[in-house]
């Protein structure tokens, strides 16, 4: 695992078209990733708090990039993911911290927690990830 690989993964994440809407931050280390997101009304459901899909995205992204830190040749894919929503949130900063809990040859397991700036847990999740046949390349945004 090289620092260049980690920085390229961060660039790939930030260049993804979906993230123009979410405006997240990311920091990746070996077997771990941290995703930050500012809560804003565009992320709310009708009852005025962050939609569960946003919490899922934070959890999945943190696990995905924690796993990707260990795979330097190909894109990994989410195979399954379980999400637990603990409480609603309607303001502040959210932080998802993901970590790999099992690294096999092709299959990885990871878990993550989303918290507010004051440390209140908003959600947690875990998933399985698999190496794909898609090479990491500049076309994916995997560049510095």
Image (tube, rainbow, N blue to C red):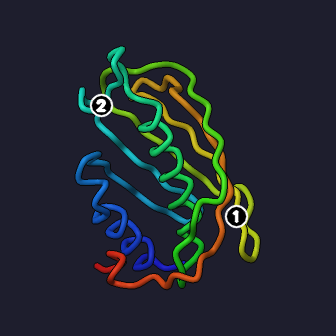
Pick the quarter of the image with the C terminus. bottom left
Q: Which mark is residue 34?
A: none
Q: Position of residue 36 (x, y in %)?
A: 36, 44
**Residue 41, placed above or below residue 128:** above
Q: Nearer the viewer, residue 79 or 115?
A: 79
Q: Which residue is mark 2?
A: 39
Label 2, label 1: how far apart the Cα atoms are: 30 Å
Q: Where is 66 relative to 70, above or below?
A: above
Q: Quadrant of the N terminus?
A: bottom right
Q: Residue furthest front?
A: 46
The tag earlier along the polypeptide, 2 or 1, is 2
Position of 52 relative to 59 (above/below): above
* Percent x, y of residue 7: 37, 71
| Labelled pair 2, 1 in contact (Cβ < 8 Å) | no
Instruction: Report x, y in % for residue 138.
Output: 33, 83
Which residue corresponds to the image point at 50% horizontal and 41% vertical from the top-left? 56
Q: What crowding class fits label 1: few (fewer than 14 Cα within 10 Å), some (14-19), or many (20 or more)?
A: many
């Amino acid at each position: 695992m090289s620092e260049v690989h980690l920085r390229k993964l961060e660039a790939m994440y930030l260049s993804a078209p979906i993230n123009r809407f979410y405006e997240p931050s990311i920091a990746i280390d070996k077997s771990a990733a941290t995703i930050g997101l500012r809560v804003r009304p565009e992320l709310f459901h009708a009852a005025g708090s962050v939609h569960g899909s946003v919490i899922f995205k934070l959890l999945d992204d943190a696990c995905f990039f924690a796993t990707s830190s260990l795979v330097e040749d190909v894109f990994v894919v989410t195979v399954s993911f379980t999400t637990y929503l603990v409480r609603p949130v309607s303001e502040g900063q959210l932080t998802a911290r993901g970590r790999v809990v099992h690294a096999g040859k092709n299959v990885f397991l990871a878990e993550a927690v989303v918290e507010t700036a004051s440390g209140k847990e908003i959600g947690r999740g875990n998933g399985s990830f698999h190496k794909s046949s898609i090479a990491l390349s500049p076309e994916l945004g995997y560049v510095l």
